[in-house]
Image: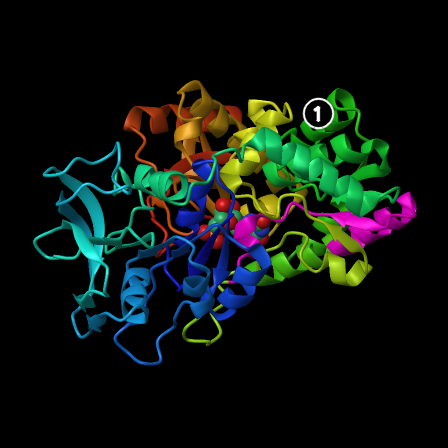
Amino acid sequence: TVLIIDFGSQVTQLIARRVREAGVYSEIVPFQSAEEGFRRLKPKAVILSGGPASAAEADSPRAPDAIFEAGVPVLGICYGQQTLCVQLGGAVEGGHHREFGRAFVEVLKPSPLFEGVWETGQKHQVWMSHGDRVTRLPEGFEVIAASPNAPLAATADEARNYYAVQFHPEVVHTPDGARLLSNFVHKIAGLKGDWTMAAYRDQAIAAIREQVGDGKVICGLSGGVDSSVAALLIHEAIGDQLTCILVDHGLLRKDEAAQVVEMFRGHYNIPLVHVDASDTFIGALEGEADPEKKRKTIGKLFIDVFEAEAKKVGGADFLAQGTLYPDVIESVSFTGGPSVTIKSHHNVGGLPERMNMKLVEPLRELFKDEVRELGKELGLPESFIGRHPFPGPGLAIRLPGGVTRDKIRILQEADAIYLDEIRKAGLYDAIWQAFAVLLPVQTVGVMGDGRTYEFVCALRAVTSVDGMTADFYPFDMEFLGNAATRIINEVRGINRVVYDVTSKPPGTIEWE
Ligand code: XMP
C-alpha cells in the first residue's frame, strides 16, 4: 500500500489513480488523521500531496514524524515538497504569488525517479505550481532537475529514498508524470505492480461473503453503472441471497426500465423487483415547479417506496450501495465554513439511517473508471458500462415548469432521437452527458400550411472529466440541424429546438 497524505490539493485524487494504474493499491488520508492512517495501513511508501497552505508559516500542516522515523520512501509534491524540506531541516520562503502552468525542466543528474523516462540534459514539459520556494535544502538532498523559475524543481536524498518535486507529476499536463510516479512506487519503493481488477474482484467477492454470511441483501438498482456493477459483484458472491429493487418513478429515459429488467432478470437471472411507482411520483410532482421542492419530493418518496418494497421482500439484513471512493474520501477543509447548496443531490442517501440496516458497499475503494473496468471484468455489456450519467431525480429536473405524463412522454421521445443521432454520428463516447430538456415555453411555427403553437426543446451536451466543471460540446451545425429536424418532424408537441452553449460554471449541467 502507498499512503497519500492530502494537504488539500484539488488534484490529490489523481495521485491515487496514477499509483493504482501502476498496479499498486493506494489510499488517501487527510493530513489531520495521517498518523492514524500511517499506523493502520503500514504503507511501504508515502506521498505528500500539494495544498493551499504555506509551509513557511509555523502553524501550517505537517506530515507526521512517524513516517520519517519508520524510514519509508517519501515523495513530496508541491506543498508536500516544501513541508518535507522544512521538516527535514531545510528552509522555505513565502510571500511569492502562486503560479500555475506549463514549464520545462532540465534534468541535471540521473536518478531512480527518472530511470527509463528522462535522460540527463534533456528538457521536459511539466505542470508547475510555484509560489513558496525552497531556499535551503535539507542535509543529504541534491538538485536533480531545474527550470528557469524553479531552480529546485526536483530534489532527492537518494540514500534515504526521499524525493521532492515542485511540479505535479499526477496531472496529464505533465506528460511523463505517470511514469515518474510508477518509478517511485516500483523502482524506489520496490513495490510489485500486482493490483489488478481481476485480483480486486476475487478479493471483493471474498470480503462480501465474509461480511454477509448467510444473511440477505437488498440492492436498489437504477440502471446506472455503479449500482449495476455493485449488484453483479454481490450476486457473484452470494447468489440469490441478493434481491434487487428497481424503483421506477416513471421519470427514466425511454425504455430504460425495460432494459434494466431484461438485463438483470433476463440475462443475469438476478432476483429483481420492478416497482412501477410512477403514479405516486408523478401525482406528487403535479403542479410543482420549484426545482428544490421537486428534488426533495422525489428523494423522500424514493425512500418511502424503497422501504415499503424492502419490507415486502422481507428479512433483509444488509443494504447494498454503489458508493464510490470519491464519496468516501474526507475532503480537506481549510476554511471550515459551510459550502453553499447549489442542488440537493438525490441518490439513496438517507436510506441506511432510516432502515437501520448494515451496509454492503463493495465499490467503496474504487474510482469511476475502475468501476467500469470491474464491470467489464464481470461481463457487463458496453451499453451499460459506457452509459452517460443520469441524475437520480431523472427527467423531472429536465422539465422546468412542472411534470405531467404528457410532457414526460414528449421529452422521452425527443431525448431518444437526440441520443440516437449522437450514437449514429459516433459521438456518444466523446460526450460526458447529452440530453434533451423540454421548456415550458410555447412558440409559433408553421408546419405544412398550418400554424403550430408548441413547446421548445433544448438540447444539451457537455464534455467533462468529473461533472464538477464542464464545457458545451461543439457539434457542427449540420449535426444540430439534422437532430432538430428529426425531433420536430417525429415528436408531436415540439415545434422548435435550441442548443445550450453554456459551460459549467456559470451554468450547471442539468437545468434544475
Ligand atoms: P449539475 O447539474 O449539478 O450536475 O452540474 C452534475 C452531475 O450530477 C448529476 N446530477 C445528479 N446525480 N442525483 C444524482 O445522482 C442528483 O440529484 C443529481 N443532480 C445532478 C448530473 O446529471 C451531472 O452528471
**Viewer-nearest residue: 82 or 331:** 82
User: Is 444 left, or right, of 145 in this rendering?
Assistant: right
Mark 1: secondary structure: helix
- Please name the residue shown 17% across and 75% down the image: 95
Task: Say whether residue 340 is magenta.
Answer: no
- Please name the residue shown 73% across and 24% down the image: 262
**Viewer-nearest residue: 362 or 471:** 362
In x, y percent, where is residue 219? 76, 43
Amino acid of disc 1: Met
In x, y percent, where is residue 319? 77, 49
Quadrant of residue 268 in the image? top right
> From where the camera sits, is residue 219 visible?
yes
**Which residue was labeled with disc 1?**
263
In x, y percent, where is residue 490? 52, 24
In x, y percent, where is residue 45? 44, 51
Task: Say whether residue 306 is magenta.
Answer: yes
How many C-alpha atoms fall within 10 Å of the one at disc 1: few (<14), some, or many (≥20)?
some
For the record, the magenta segment spans 303-330
> From where the camera sits, is residue 290 visible?
no
Residue at mark 1: C-beta within 8 A of ligand 1: no
User: Is 74 left, or right, of 512 in this rendering?
Assistant: left
User: Is 469 left, or right, of 330 in this rendering?
Assistant: left
**Viewer-nearest residue: 254 or 135:** 135
